[in-house]
Image (cartoon, rainbow, N blue to C red):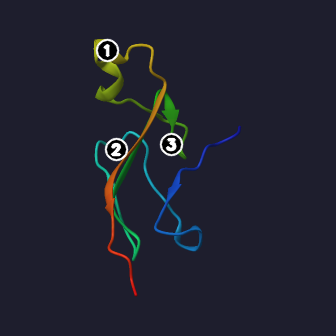
Amino acid sequence: MPRLRILAGPSMAELKPIQANSGSATDISSEAFEGKVAVYIKNFADTNGEILKSPYFEQEARKDVTWSVQVQGKPQAAIS
């Protein structure tokens, strides 16, 4: 069965798996960016095939939403 792996990090060389639907964001920090990322995927199955439910999708305003990638942060000052 196909699986979706979700990776995040400060650069392509430093990507690490993150958990969808965890309810908590993953910190990302580099010389260029400081922030957090969170991923929600409706009916997402973990590596054991268990469906990870999330209260995120139970809100009426999100009944037709199937995924969400949320990024919050700020660019860091330019390095001279």
The foreground one among 9 and 47 is 9
| Element under disc 1 | helix
Task: Determine the image quadrant of residue 69.
Answer: top left
Query: How many numbered discs sit on the rendered protein?
Result: 3
What type is the residue that disc 3 sits on?
Answer: Asp
Mark 2, residue position: 22
What type is the residue that disc 1 sits on?
Answer: Ala
Q: Position of residue 78 (x, y in %)?
A: 38, 77
- Say few, some or many: other residues with alpha carbon within 10 Å of mark 2 (under 14 / 14 to 19 / 20 or more): some
Task: Return the mark for residue 46.
Answer: 3
Q: Position of residue 22 (x, y in %)?
A: 34, 44
Dot placed on the residue nearer the N-terminal end, 3 or 2: 2
Dot placed on the residue nearer the N-terminal end, 3 or 1: 3
Mark 1, residue position: 61
Residue at image location 31% in from the left, 14% down from the top: 61
What type is the residue that disc 2 sits on?
Answer: Ser
Report how far apart the C-alphas of labels 3 and 2 lie in the structure. Answer: 11 Å
The foreground one among 31 and 65 is 31
The relative height of residue 45 versus residue 27 in the rendered view (above or below) is above
